[in-house]
Structure formats: C-alpha cells, structure tokens
Image: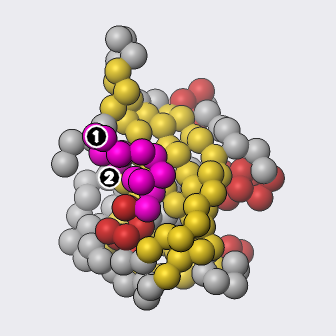
Amino acid sequence: MVAHTVNSGRYQIAAVVHTIVWDHSGKYLLLLERANTGLMDGRYALPGGHLQSGESIVEAAVREVREEADIEIERLSPCCVLPYAGGVNFVFASDAWRGSVRNAEPEKCASVDWYPRSQLPDSVVPWLTKALELHDSGDWFYDFSER
C-alpha cells in the first residue's frame, strides 16, 4: 500500500486518519495494540491509517475502522488536526456504529479492547492524550512539528 501524500512542490507529507470510537455509553474508547508494523509496536492507538489515493479523509476514516475493528461507522464528527514533522493526523470521533468489535487485522494488532477514558494504558501513542484533550475542549488544532 502506498500512502497518499500532498505535494507542495518542496516536500511531501503523509496524511493519516484516525477515529476515536466511543462505546454506545460514551464512557469507553476503542484502542488497538499495535504489533508487527515497525512503527510504535506495543503502543495503543485509535483505529486509523494512511489516506489512500482517490479517497476522501472521511472515507479513509470509515475504511480504517472497518478494516481494523470490523464495525461500520454510521456518523462521524471531525475532532482535530495534529500536524507533525513529515505528516498530519486527522482525527474524527464517532459514537454511532454497528457491528461487533473484533481484531480484524491480527497480523498488525495484538489486541483490540475498550478502555475507560480515565484509565488508558500507560503506553498510548504520543499524540492520543492531546487528541482527547482537544476533543474535550472543542479546540481543533495542535502542531506537534513545532515542539
């Protein structure tokens, strides 16, 4: 799979899309433990991945949740944008989905489970805490590339 990039004439950036999937009570979020990817393995992350050529950011968010957790997103809300050196994370949120969550990519994911917002695993991806803070505050932007 080739990551879709935006060519500015100077450099290219990776566009990565993630979704905060809340359980139907709104108290637990879905996290996947990364494995065998070569990037942040052993850390917990939201369902997500690279934007593919020809798809919209929303289409990518829906596709990634389906591919990784085997559920269908019914409603999606933009949450935040988190640029970093070499790319940008687009984060959405959803509490409207159907299906039964399962690990649909066991070759890339050691586990999939629900976690209470107040008791996240210690080893979450570095940007997840900031994304949740932005979700709660209603702010939408934080630039990791300037830190």
On the image, numbered disc 2 is attached to which residue? 39
> Label 2 neighbourhood size at 10 Å, few (<14), some (14-19), many (20+)?
few
Q: Residue 91 lies in magenta, yes or no?
A: no
Residue at left offset 52%, top offset 61%: 19
Secondary structure under tag 2 reads loop
Q: Where on the picture, by quarter, is residue 28?
A: bottom right
The residue lying at 72 percent from left, 51 percent from top is 134
**Amino acid identity at mark 2:** Leu
Q: Of all residues shown, which one is farthest toward the bottom?
A: 100
Q: Which mark is residue 53?
A: 1
Q: Which residues are magenta?
A: 50-62
Considering only vertical position in the picture, is 119 above or below 3? below
The residue located at (25%, 54%) in the rendering is 38
- Give x and y (percent) for residue 37: 26, 58
Q: Residue at x 68, y 73 (%)?
A: 117
The residue carrying pointer 1 sits among few (fewer than 14), some (14 to 19) or many (20 or more) residues within 10 Å by Cα, namely few
How many numbered marks appear?
2
